[in-house]
Image (cartoon, grey):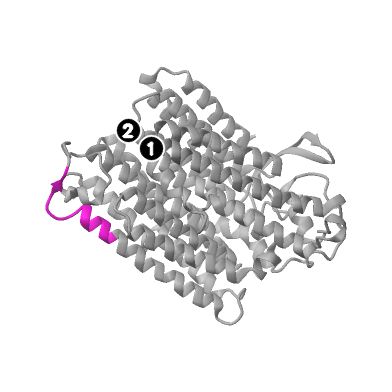
């Protein structure tokens, strides 16, 4: 019952904080958030899962019982963790605690409601990564939208309502598209499944039990392709992949910085995690057949995101567009279908979550003091805010792939795995990987340009505020994140990478689906 206890702690904390007087809400919320963090740490230390959650692996903390019946399908409360989901649950609890601590300075109104919604968001995120029944998964997936909409729409910037509505509309339409794609597969499997249990569905699809729809007008191959594309679009909006990325900069710029930490650090990983679980696990033959366009989209996201970041003057927009670029590396690793590629993609989800969280937290601390994020409005603030600037520089180097930091380890694994890949004939993946590696040069360029303009040189500040050292509670999250980033980069095998490769191993070992899609008998 560990997962249930973790979700319950977050939900109970949300209720308690909601009814806490404003003057105590921040400290109560932070103190309470340490309970899920400690529990997830205990779960990590006692993790004993093996294999992949959808392909017959032994899950950690698994619980399953029938919940309700929906027509011919049994819906169950089915949760459990493998080496893919466990690191993301730990990431969610860590970043939630640090985001709450970093909100002490900027959040000054309706604090109990703000922190209550953050803890509600944490419960939904844990549920997304732990759920193994589609109905349960979709409930948590949609539940994430509710606190995010209010957190951006109430506590955001001048255009907060526009950003909140845009975020909600984009992601809600995407949810509808992926829902249609997934249920196309469910109906195509017909009597071969009796529930919406994700392991049952994944194993039925890989065994070739997908049949036809519409009296045979939509054959199994076309159905699998259509469902794959629909789910890829639906999940790709959340990643976001170019060209579905336009909601992200607006959401980041208008959101309170602590929410930007969670948005970039965890919410974007919902999309990449879902792509791995659904598209690349359930429909491997389709994924391999579409390797060229998927790899091209990954490279475009890397290069285009980096170029967009290069043209920004708002520090938040710089970091926001860099997230688009970093998620492109995840897609490249997924489509490689090698142990290092898939493992590196998952490790990059954790790595980017930490690094982007650090970068947004640094921007938030700078904004708390200067009340500006415009690069042209400040220069030389390193002499006034040395710790914050040092953390920003560390985050920038981690983004650019400095050795012994998590960003380097993740990108190294992805590049090795992509170079080894044979999913594209000839040297296709090697060419795609080389193009993606060029993105690192652009990343280094725009981050160095931003730092040189805003952090170093003679002190200049076009504002009415006294630029001084940041408050201690603002700096603590930065220090914690730097320590974890270095630990993951220095000891990747001893932290997450070993459990990750164990979980993605069956995807590689199985190679193409054991039987071609459509060779068997599900029908509707």
10 Å neighbourhood of mark 2: few (<14), some, or many (≥20)? some
Residue 353, horizontal then vertical, whole percent: 45, 50
Residue 90 counted in the magenta span: no
Q: Could you say which quadrant of the image residue 473 lies in?
A: top left
For label 2, the residue is 106
**Residue at point 70%, 49% (across, down):** 180
Residue 256, horizontal then vertical, whole percent: 38, 37
Q: Secondary structure at mark 1?
A: loop
Residue 451 counted in the magenta span: yes
10 Å neighbourhood of mark 1: few (<14), some, or many (≥20)? many
Residues under numbered marks 1 and 2 in contact, where contact means CB atoms less than 8 Å apart: yes
Q: Could you say which quadrant of the image residue 252 lies in?
A: top left
For residue 121, side relative to residue 159 (left or right): right
Camera-nearest residue between 45 and 59: 59
Q: Secondary structure at mark 2?
A: loop
What number of labels is visible?
2
Residue 182, horizontal then vertical, whole percent: 71, 51
**Residue at point 43%, 63% (across, down):** 304
The relative height of residue 14 versus residue 43 in the rendered view (above or below) is above
Residue 485 visible in the snapshot: yes
For label 1, the residue is 256
Marked residue nearer the N-terminal end (1 or 2): 2
Residue 224, horizontal then vertical, whole percent: 74, 60
Residue 83 visible in the snapshot: no
Q: Which residues are magenta?
A: 448-462
The relative height of residue 206 versus residue 417 in the rendered view (above or below) is above
For the N terminus, the image quarter is top right
Camera-nearest residue between 205 and 228: 228
**Residue at point 16%, 51% (across, down):** 380
The relative height of residue 331 versus residue 194 in the rendered view (above or below) is below
């Amino acid at each position: 019952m560990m997962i249930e206890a973790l979700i319950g702690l977050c939900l109970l904390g949300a209720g308690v904080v909601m009814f806490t007087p404003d003057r105590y809400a921040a400290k109560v919320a932070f103190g309470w958030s340490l309970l899920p963090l400690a529990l997830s740490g205990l779960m990590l230390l006692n993790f004993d899962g093996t294999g992949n959650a959808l392909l017959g692996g032994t899950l950690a903390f698994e619980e399953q019982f029938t919940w309700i019946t929906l027509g011919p399908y049994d819906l169950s409360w089915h949760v459990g963790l493998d080496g893919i989901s466990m690191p993301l649950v730990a990431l969610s609890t860590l970043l939630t605690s640090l985001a709450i601590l970093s909100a002490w300075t900027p959040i000054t109104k309706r604090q109990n409601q703000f922190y209550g919604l953050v803890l509600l968001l944490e419960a939904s995120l844990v549920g997304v990564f732990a759920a193994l029944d589609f109905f349960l998964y979709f409930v948590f997936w949609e539940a994430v939208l509710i606190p995010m909409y209010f957190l951006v729409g109430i506590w955001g910037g001048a255009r907060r309502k526009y950003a909140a509505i845009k975020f909600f509309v984009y992601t809600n339409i995407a949810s509808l598209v992926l829902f249609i794609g997934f249920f196309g597969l469910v109906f195509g499997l017909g009597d071969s499944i009796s529930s919406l249990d994700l392991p049952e569905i994944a194993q039925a699809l890989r065994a070739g039990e997908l049949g036809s729809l519409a009296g045979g007008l939509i054959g199994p191959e076309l159905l699998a392709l259509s469902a794959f594309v629909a789910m890829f679009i639906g999940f790709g909006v959340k990643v976001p992949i170019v060209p579905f990325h336009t909601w992200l900069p607006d959401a980041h710029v208008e959101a309170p910085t602590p929410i930007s930490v969670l948005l970039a650090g965890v919410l974007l990983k919902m999309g990449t995690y879902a792509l791995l679980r659904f598209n690349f696990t359930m429909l491997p033959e389709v994924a391999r057949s579409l390797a060229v366009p998927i790899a091209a989209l990954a490279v475009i996201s890397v290069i285009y995101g980096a170029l967009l970041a290069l043209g920004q003057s708002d520090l938040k927009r710089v970091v926001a567009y860099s997230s688009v670029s970093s998620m492109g590396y995840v897609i490249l690793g997924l489509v490689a279908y090698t142990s290092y590629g898939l493992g590196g993609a998952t490790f990059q989800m954790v790595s980017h979550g930490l690094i982007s969280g650090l970068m947004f937290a640094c921007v938030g601390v700078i904004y708390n003091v200067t009340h500006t994020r415009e690069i042209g409005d400040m220069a030389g603030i390193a002499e006034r805010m040395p710790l914050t600037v040092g953390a920003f520089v560390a985050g920038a180097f981690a983004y650019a792939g400095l050795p012994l930091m998590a960003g380097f380890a993740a990108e190294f694994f992805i590049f090795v795995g992509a170079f080894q890949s044979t999913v594209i004939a000839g040297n296709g993946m090697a060419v795609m990987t080389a193009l993606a590696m060029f993105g690192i040069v652009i990343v280094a360029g725009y981050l160095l340009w931003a730092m040189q303009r805003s952090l170093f040189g003679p002190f200049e500040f076009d504002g009415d505020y006294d630029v001084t050292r940041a408050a201690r509670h603002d700096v603590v999250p930065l220090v914690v994140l730097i320590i974890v980033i270095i630990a993951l980069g220095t000891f990747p095998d001893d932290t997450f990478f070993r459990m990750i490769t164990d979980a993605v191993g069956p995807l590689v070992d199985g190679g193409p689906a054991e039987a071609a899609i459509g060779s068997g008998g599900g029908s509707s």
